[in-house]
Image (cartoon, rainbow, N blue to C red):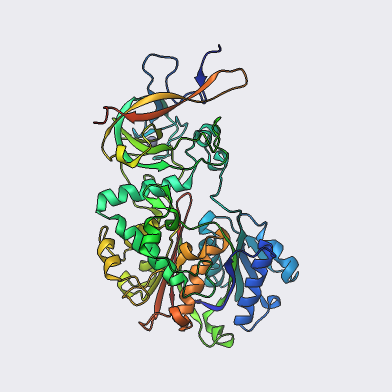
Amino acid sequence: MDVAIIGLGMHPFGRSPSMSGLEQGAAAARAALKDAGTDFKRMEFAFGGSQDSGNADSLVNLLGLTGLQFTNVANGCATGGSSLNAAYSAIKSGQYDIGLVVGFDKHDRGAFNPKPSDWGLDDWYGETGLMLTTQYFGMKIQRYMYDHNISKSTLIRVAEKAFRNGSLTPTAWRQTALSWEEIENAPMVSEPLNKYMFCSPAEGGCALVVCRADIAHKFHTQPIYLKTAVVRSRNYGSFEVFSPSQPPKVADSPTVTASQTAFELAGIGPEDIDVAQLQDTEVGAEIMHMAENGFCEHGEQEKWLADGVTEITGRLPVNTDGGCLANGEPVGASGLRQVHEVCTQLRGDGGARQVANDPKVGYTHVYGAPGISGVNILAR
Amino acid sequence: MVAAKPLHEGLFSWPTEIPNLIGSQCLDCGEYAFPKQNSCRACSGQNMTSADLGNAGNLWTWTVQSFMPKTPYHTHETQETFTPYGVGYIEMACGLKVESRLRENSPELLKIGMPMKLEIITVRTDDEGSDLLTFQFCAAEEQS
Ligand SMILES: [Zn+2]
């Protein structure tokens, strides 16, 4: 049984001081149900996730105690990807006809402060100052730039594009475009990445209603079909966050394995994708993920960014809503925002940021610690 | 005066004149790990032995920690006294890359491939006044 997405809902990312994370999740769920022209009573199952805002299944207190199967998902930044993957399987298997996927979060300002024991590490690692995701991102792109001749200009171009796209997106957190100089001269966080090159923890909610493809038209005139949803974890040798040591040989990242599997299952290739969302926790991630997802060769990003290939007006628009950089990252919701945006583009509802290439096939890629990648291929 | 001791036992040989990093090696597949592990990340085997990783290597990648980290970071520094530090991976002789603080803390002093050597530094003192030690790497040759 094929799977369709018939409802899109979002509670805008950023700051909502008067609302809890859970309430933002409920707002997103209601919006998605409304978009699908249905209600919560009709939902047979739900998969949901939140890192810092409590159990996702508490949403039933706000949406209604209907007795549905509600499963909580916790996969770090890849939570949204894992939730949608689970919903895909639930419908694909024939077990259910229609259900809800929802994610939300409300994080404190500033960097996350993870505990070593949660990651199987001893306290010394954190106490001596190695337990920072920002360091990992800096070191990973530093080596990548060295190996593949990527310049600092390319880092700046990715940030420039993100905030420019954010300025065209009414639901984005950062809606002000930034100049080259503003980005270049921002305070350094972790060499070579500065303040405007990182996304920040934020708040927000996102939800999708999914159903059997053969009943999709009863709910929405423009169903978007979820061709495939793949999640993979890291192999031995993948360079991941919070690793006190790494093996000599660098292995392919989980993004490569998830992406290759997704393309294989969908029976198409990277050249068939018209619009994409690639995890951009920081600018280096977007650059590396362009190649890891098979869209270009390693090192080719330098030319792609200079030529504007990934701009809204380009051949392969990437992160058309400004991605994580302009929307911030409410961890539980972030992966679903990507799907929400690609579906919006495929429906032609992107407004000022609508891509011009009449997109038929879209792609989303989420990546989270400690080495989980989720890829979705979507088509209208 | 109480004797200095490692913040965490087993990361490096101590006390000794020239400390080396201590990791483990899998007797089944030969892969190394740091810190010491009881099972192998490569082959899932549990036939592990302690391995001397040496005290020198080359810088594989690096960054600089420019602001004072939040907890679990634990030193006696304050926002005012915090000194930025480098962070990098050092490729050891066996090929394993070990993550470490670096003494060098500015981009001009750090270059991928440069030779690095181990040194032992004080993280903080405990309630009895003992220095608690950890390892870091620094440039093996004076920068010109
Ligand atoms: Zn082994």
Which quadrant would the C terminus of chain A be assigned to in this image?
Answer: bottom left
Question: Residue A10's spot in the image, x, y percent?
Answer: 58, 72
Question: Residue A63's spot in the image, x, y percent?
Answer: 72, 71
- Find the residue positioned furthest to the top: B1
Question: Residue A330's spot in the image, x, y percent?
Answer: 56, 60
Q: State the residue in front, B76 or A309.
A: B76
Q: State the residue in front, A41 or A51.
A: A51
Query: Which residue is pictured at 28% across the width and 55% down the height?
Result: A151
Q: Residue A301 lies in what quarter of the image?
A: bottom left
Query: Which residue is pictured at 54% across the width and 31% down the height?
Result: B75
Can you say whether B44 is above or below A235 in the image?
above
Q: State the residue in front, B110 or A265.
A: B110
Q: Count the marks.
A: 0
Left or right: A140, with A62 as reference point: left
Q: Is residue A146 visible?
A: yes
- Taking the image in four quarters, ligand 1 sits in the one at top left
Question: Residue A215's spot in the image, x, y percent?
Answer: 56, 84
Q: Is residue B94 visible?
A: no
Left or right: A300, with A172 as reference point: left
Can you say whether A183 is above or below A360 in the image?
above
Q: State the residue in front, A78 or A341.
A: A341
Query: Which residue is pictured at 52% across the width and 41% down the height?
Result: B69
